[in-house]
């Protein structure tokens, strides 16, 4: 109400975006709908407070309650993921990963990560990211035939290049990750192993994906994807991490502040605390289980329409489709699907012959539609619409009508 009076232009755009989210299906795998409780904490007066430093050791006065909030958030994260130390201050995933580099590496060191076009992340050594600019980044990829991580190649590259740090995790990898195998490889060359679980954090918390915690030294994550919190990031140190380097918690904390960031966003941290509480409930386990069931149902139905699913399936919340047999680019499919209210994103496929801006694939995820309460039946319906609109772009009106009806039946969470 206040916003409408003070800034009608922004109020109107927020209203339009709210309506867009209500009336369309959000199927970008890295997106979700957080609860009103999370949003209430995020929009709270905590946004006004400076709190550089850490609980009990701040550079500003007036942090009596802020300290409690941050400590609760840390304790909830430690318990949920079973780790020894957590920093909840990174503003998001990239700053979390940058802080890990700052804590463990020197500029020029060799690092290894999954290549971006194979499903990795920008910060795992991509040439245009700080991680590829300041470090000697070696990329590993997927097996061309199976489209799965090629652990033999990872091992060979690790032995050849002796990296200081190895990343495991990605943004477009739909299969289980063998953290144990990665742990053995990293140990054999004495490297830090860091699991970036931004995409699967909610699945790990919900017990439907193997936790990396016993096998890696550090875990980073965002908090707004499958974990269903506000935008934010966390860095966790495991028992194995402490065994490798007792000072790792101190190094991580110093890297985040004052190394990389100034004041933490305590409103976000309070909202992360709320989401961590939600994620420790039984209902969240059911939610995580349903995300995966829905992704699998989508895969099975799309296969019936002859869609070519990368690696033949999914074990998590996302699927990647190679559209080359459908004679349509990822960009064209993204636009077409958007016109009927299905929001997905174009994506490179492994060994993609097409350029990244016009890739051959699309990436689809089920976290947000599962939050709305949709199940396998609705996934089959959505797969049918995806097929229909790609086969016959003239069917926009009828498909849009169906999507609208479905959205009304499954409103956004309260
Ligand atoms: N941008 C995120 C994603 O969409 O997967 C990764 O950071």
Image (spheres, grey):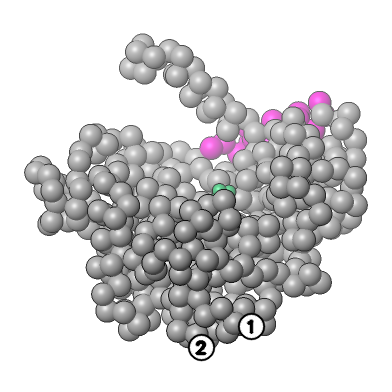
The residue wearing badge 1 is: 156
Magenta-tinted stretch: 397-412
Q: Residue at x 71, y 47 (%)?
A: 356
Magenta stretch mostly in which secondary structure?
helix
Q: Is residue 153 magenta?
A: no
Q: Is residue 392 visible?
A: yes
Question: From the image, which quarter does the N terminus lie in?
Answer: top left
Camera-side residue of 156 and 338: 156
The residue wearing badge 2 is: 188
Q: Residue at x 77, y 61 (%)?
A: 351
The span from disc 1 to disc 2 (Cα, nearest Å) is 11 Å
Q: Residue furthest left?
A: 61
Q: Residue at x 30, y 49 (%)?
A: 261
Q: Is residue 281 visible?
A: no
Expressed as whole percent of the image width and height from the top left, the position of residue 94 reads 45, 52
147 on left or right of 238: right
Corner quadrant of residue 337: top right
Q: Secondary structure at mark 2?
A: helix
Which numbered disc covers residue 275? none
Q: Is mark 1 within 8 Å of ligand 1?
A: no
């Amino acid at each position: 109400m206040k916003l409408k009076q003070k800034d009608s232009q922004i109020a109107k755009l927020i209203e339009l975006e709210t309506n867009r989210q209500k009336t369309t299906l959000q199927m970008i795998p890295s997106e979700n709908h957080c609860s009103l409780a999370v949003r209430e904490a995020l929009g709270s007066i905590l946004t006004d407070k400076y709190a550089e430093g850490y609980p009990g050791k701040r550079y500003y006065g007036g942090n009596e309650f802020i300290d409690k909030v941050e400590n609760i958030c840390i304790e909830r994260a430690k318990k949920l993921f079973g780790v020894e130390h957590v920093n909840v201050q990174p503003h998001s995933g990239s700053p979390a990963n940058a802080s890990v580099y700052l804590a463990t590496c020197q500029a020029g060191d060799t690092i290894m990560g999954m290549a971006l076009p194979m499903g990795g992340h920008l910060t795992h050594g991509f040439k245009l990211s700080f991680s590829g600019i300041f470090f000697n980044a070696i990329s590993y990829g997927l097996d061309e035939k199976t489209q799965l991580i090629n652990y033999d190649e990872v091992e060979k590259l690790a032995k050849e290049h002796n990296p200081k740090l190895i990343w495991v995790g990605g943004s477009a990898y739909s299969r289980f990750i063998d953290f144990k195998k990665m742990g053995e490889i990293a140990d054999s060359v004495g490297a830090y192993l860091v699991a970036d679980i931004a995409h699967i954090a909610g699945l790990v918390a919900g017990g439907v994906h193997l936790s990396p915690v016993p096998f890696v030294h550090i875990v980073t994550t965002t908090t707004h994807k499958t974990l269903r919190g506000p935008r934010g990031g966390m860095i966790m140190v495991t028992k194995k991490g402490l065994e490798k380097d007792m000072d790792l918690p101190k190094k991580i904390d110093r890297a985040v502040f004052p190394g990389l960031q100034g004041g933490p966003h305590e409103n976000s941290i309070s909202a992360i605390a709320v989401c961590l509480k939600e994620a420790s409930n039984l209902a969240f386990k059911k939610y995580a289980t349903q995300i995966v069931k829905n992704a699998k149902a989508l895969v099975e139905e799309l296969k019936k329409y002859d869609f070519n699913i990368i690696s033949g399936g999914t074990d998590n919340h996302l699927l990647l489709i190679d559209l080359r047999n459908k004679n349509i680019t990822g960009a064209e499919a993204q636009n077409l699907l958007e016109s009927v209210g299905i929001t997905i994103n174009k994506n490179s496929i492994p060994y993609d012959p097409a350029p990244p801006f016009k890739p051959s694939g699309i990436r689809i995820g089920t976290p947000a539609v599962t939050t709305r309460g949709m199940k396998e039946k609705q996934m089959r319906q959505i797969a049918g619409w995806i097929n229909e609109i790609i086969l016959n772009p003239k069917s926009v009106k009828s498909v849009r009508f169906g999507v609208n009806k479905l959205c009304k039946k499954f409103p956004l969470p309260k």
